[in-house]
Amino acid sequence: MKLSAKGRYAIKAMINIAMNDSGTPKTLLEISKHQGISLSYLEQLFALLRKGNLVAGVRGPGGGYRLSADPSEITIAQIINAINSDTNSSLDHQKKDELIWERFSDKLCKYLETVTLGSLISEGVDVVDQHDAVTEESIITEESLVKDEWDAA
């Protein structure tokens, strides 16, 4: 398994599609603008994701891409493997650092097989909700302190 920027962009694009509440397919142009990456680069990624049966294209007006399965059924390992399907990895068994990295990659892959797109999204939403709660609480506290100082003056 190769961890790369390409894999990160693919995972973020899949999250973007999964979080689409409108029910309409997401266009690559929308994803491109949201992520700040080129449309041609996304087209290459989505060709691989489509080949890996992770997304399905919808043609015509209002077309775009949808996930091929529920987010809870798509693992992060599947996304990374689909993106890396076009790379041929030749391992030099004489180099210990490559062997160590390969063992680490295997362990990481086993872990990423347990992480689904759905679980990643729900964990992310929980973190955002906690951050928002802390922020709201701190604003209320700061407003109270400012008001108390103002009243005392």
Image (cartoon, rainbow, N blue to C red):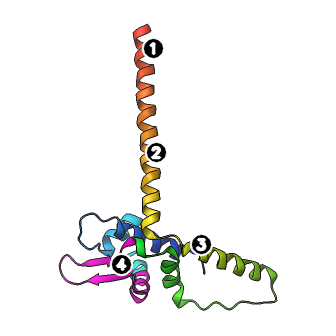
For disc 1, the marked residue is: 149
Secondary structure of the residue carrying tag 4 is loop
For disc 2, the marked residue is: 131
Secondary structure of the residue carrying tag 1 is helix
Tell whether position 140 is magenta. no
Residue 20 lies left or right of residue 153; in this view the side is left
Earlier sequence position, callout 3 versus callout 1: 3
Looking at the rendered image, the disc whose residue lies closer to the viewer, 2 or 4, is: 4
Say what amino acid the circle numbered 2 marks.
His
For disc 3, the marked residue is: 111
Give the CA distance from mark 2 to mark 3. 27 Å
User: Residue 89 at x, y = what percent?
Assistant: 64, 89
Say what amino acid the circle numbered 3 marks.
Tyr
Earlier sequence position, callout 2 versus callout 4: 4
- Residue at the image point whose x is 33% and y is 75% from the top: 28
Q: Is residue 70 above or below residue 86?
A: above
Q: Which residues are magenta?
A: 43-71
Q: Is residue 21 above or below residue 114?
A: above
Say what amino acid the circle numbered 4 marks.
Ala
Earlier sequence position, callout 3 versus callout 4: 4
Looking at the rendered image, the disc whose residue lies closer to the viewer, 2 or 1, is: 2
Earlier sequence position, callout 2 versus callout 3: 3
Q: Is residue 136 something one can see in this rendering?
A: yes
Give the CA distance from mark 3 to mark 1. 52 Å
Residue 138 lies left or right of residue 63; in this view the side is right
User: Residue 40 at x, y = what percent?
Assistant: 39, 80
Residue 90 lies left or right of residue 96; in this view the side is left
User: Residue 92 at x, y = what percent?
Assistant: 75, 90
Return the residue found at the far left: 61
Quadrant of image for the N terminus: bottom right
